[in-house]
């Protein structure tokens, strides 16, 4: 099994194409859980329910995780509750967007 920090680092390679910030720092990733057999379950959201980049972000997240040694399959579940807010962003992401 891969360490959770390695999985999170893999998700940091996924960039929101509209905001140009990774999905972890944006606060889009809610939960990462590992199961037996190399399966990883991720609960994440989007900045808005109608985000046009949603399919691309989900696909890239799956690909990034499945590229980690020890991960056989990654399942990405989009959740809308709780809804995403800018409060979930890291300080670094806020700085990049000029939000103080």
Image: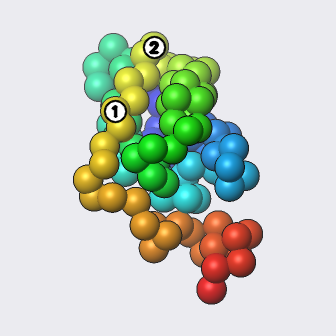
Q: Position of residue 65 (x, y in %)?
A: 53, 28
* Above or below 83: residue 53: above
- For the point 58% across and 59% down, the residue is 25
Q: Position of residue 92 (x, y in %)?
A: 67, 70
Number of numbered callouts drawn: 2
* Above or below 27: residue 42: above
The residue labelled by disc 1 is 77
* Above or below 17: residue 99: below
Q: What mark, if any, has residue 58 been given in the picture?
A: none
The N terminus sits in image quarter: top left
- For the point 58% across and 38% down, the residue is 53
Q: What mark, if any, has residue 72 been given in the picture?
A: 2
- For the point 31% across and 43% down, the residue is 79
Label 2, label 1: how many angstroms apart (C-alpha)?
17 Å
Neighbourhood count class around disc 2 (C-alpha, 10 Å): few under 14, some 14–19, many 20 upward = some
* Above or below 27: residue 10: above
Q: Position of residue 13 (x, y in %)?
A: 67, 40
Looking at the image, which is closer to me, 78 or 68?
Answer: 78
The C terminus sits in image quarter: bottom right
Neighbourhood count class around disc 1 (C-alpha, 10 Å): few under 14, some 14–19, many 20 upward = few
Looking at the image, which is closer to me, 67 or 22?
Answer: 22
Secondary structure beneath disc 1? strand
In the image, taking residue 72 as reference, residue 79 lies left or right, namely left
Q: Position of residue 28 (x, y in %)?
A: 47, 52
- For the point 45% across and 44% down, the residue is 50
Q: Residue 23: in sight, yes or no?
A: yes
Q: Residue 29: in sight, yes or no?
A: no
Quarter where residue 76 is shown: top left
Secondary structure beneath disc 2? loop
């Amino acid at each position: 099994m891969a360490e959770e920090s390695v999985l999170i680092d893999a998700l940091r390679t996924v960039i929101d194409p509209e905001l140009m910030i990774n999905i972890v720092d944006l606060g889009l990733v809610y939960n990462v859980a590992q199961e037996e057999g190399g399966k990883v379950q991720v609960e994440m959201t989007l900045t808005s329910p109608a985000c046009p980049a949603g399919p691309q972000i989900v696909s890239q997240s799956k690909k990034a995780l499945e590229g980690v040694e020890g991960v056989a399959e990654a399942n990405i579940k989009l959740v809308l509750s709780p809804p995403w807010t800018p409060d979930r962003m890291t300080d670094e992401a806020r700085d990049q967007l000029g939000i103080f």
